[in-house]
Image (cartoon, rainbow, N blue to C red):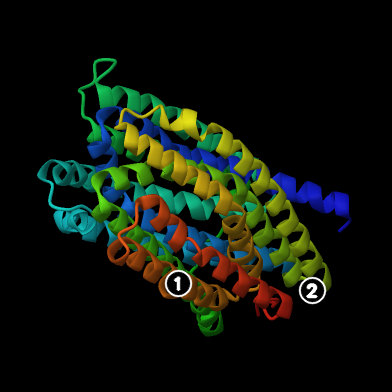
Amino acid sequence: MKSNSFFASVVRIAIPVGFQSMLQSSFAMIDQLMVGQLGSGAVAAIEAAGRPAFIYSVMSGAAAAVAGIMIAQYLGMGDKKRADQSLSVNLTAVLLLAAVFLAVCLSFPGRIIRIFIEDEPSILALGQDYLVRIVWTCLPLGASSILSVMIRCMDRAALPLFAGISAAVINTALNYALIFGHFGFPSLGIAGAAIASVISQAVHFALIAVMFLHVRGCRFSFSLSLGRTGWRQFIQILLPALVSEFLWSAGQSVNTFLYGHISTGALAAMSMTGPVQGLFIGAMSGVSQAAGILIGKRLGAKEYGPARQDAQKLLGYGFAGSLVLSAVLIGLRTPYVQLYNVEPEVRTAAAWLLFLFAVLAPLKVANMILGGGIIRSGGKTAYVMAIDIIGTWFIGVPLGLVSAFVLQLPVTWVYFILSQEELIRLLLSLFIFRRGTWMGKLS
């Protein structure tokens, strides 16, 4: 694959995927900006209540990444039957996972909210009201993420972008109507934000399903018949990926616990940065997905030398893109926090947190491309699991607990200190990349 041809292939995948991920993140940003007009208590309630849905989205994203690995490699081998089987088992996995999250969140909403927020009755009530609604996004979100993988692997990456644009427009309109009571709708506050998200995610799934049928149509055959070898290989790839993402997202939830116990204002400030972080990472996630698909096809065809060269190019693209976006974020962070109707000290803390995130973002993006795309493309999800466990639970969480509860530092310093896990994760990922043991072909 010539250099110009490779870059064009990256662009065809990365730009639509990046925009779609940004649109997905825009759901949270729109919720936050509109709910932000209701005060810092409402912002903090959404941050706490959104944790289970966040954990599910990360885990379903892991299943989508595994589906991408398997489908890309099998398409590289020219085996469309096994590509269909890979999609079928991953789709079933995310739907079963969604059912588990629904059952837990609907059964224990109050207990879940109390994990992240100290006993403030008004905020607890708001959070519980939001949680029992927002958890219904899990089903359409998980199904959409898996079906979109097949569409992208068949070189139609722009199609899911159109579905994302439509869903974002619907989400914005419904938020405006249901949060504040416009167009004759009742004023539901943060519960309205959750309802808007559920409806827009359902529409998004419906559009993705239609696009999937258009691309794959009657040629797709749903089958869970992988055989003993196939099931063993699937579990060896999926299980470490799910464990890795669950433990990483659980670690992020520990961080939310830390911020919430520093103060409601600290949690609100961090919550204000969440949508921007999601947009930033979403913009660069296209490079990670391109890595998984393009390098996966290389490995499926046993083109190991070109696979390594392409991986190095993708890391360069990601680093350059993250520097540009970091500069933009530093320039826009102050106008952004002014959009929220919160206390001045909360705005100041949020602006500093966004600055720190911009500084750390190139490390985060490099880790996403290496762990989420390159290393996983060879099916070596156990490597990524080990890296994430070490980074999150041996570095990030202990540093966060010490800085918050022992040193009692402000939220900005707590965030910066615990984020040093990204440096450790990057060093470990680069070590594995240089050794080349991540390169492998599925049987």
User: Residue drawn at (32%, 61%), measured in percent from left and top?
Assistant: 404
Which quadrant is home to the N terminus? bottom right
Viewer-nearest residue: 119 or 233: 119
Q: Is residue 78 left or right of residue 39?
A: right
Secondary structure, mark 1, is helix
Viewer-nearest residue: 366 or 261: 261
In the image, farthest residue toward the left? 121
In this orientation, does residue 111 appear? yes
Q: Amino acid at mark 2?
A: Tyr
Classify 10 Å Cα crowding around label 1: few (below 14), some (14-19), many (20 and above).
Answer: many
Residue 87 picture location, percent across and down? 53, 62
Compared with 271, 84 (above or below) is below
Secondary structure, mark 2, is helix
Compared with 26, 248 (above or below) is below
Residue 279 picture location, percent across and down? 52, 42
In this orientation, does residue 218 appear? no
- What's the CA distance linking mark 2 and mark 1? 33 Å
Q: Is residue 72 left or right of residue 42?
A: right
Residue 223 picture location, percent across and down? 50, 66
In the image, farthest residue toward the top? 183
User: Residue drawn at (27%, 36%), measured in percent from left and top?
Assistant: 40
Q: Which residue is mark 1?
A: 395
Q: Which residue is mark 2?
A: 304
Compared with 380, 250 (above or below) is above
User: Residue drawn at (48%, 41%), measured in percent from left and top?
Assistant: 276
Residue 294 occupies which quadrant of the picture? Answer: bottom right
Q: Is residue 264 left or right of residue 238?
A: left
User: Residue drawn at (72%, 64%), measured in percent from left and top?
Assistant: 295
Which quadrant is home to the C terminus? bottom right
Residue 366 occupies which quadrant of the picture? Answer: bottom right
How many numbered circles are shown? 2
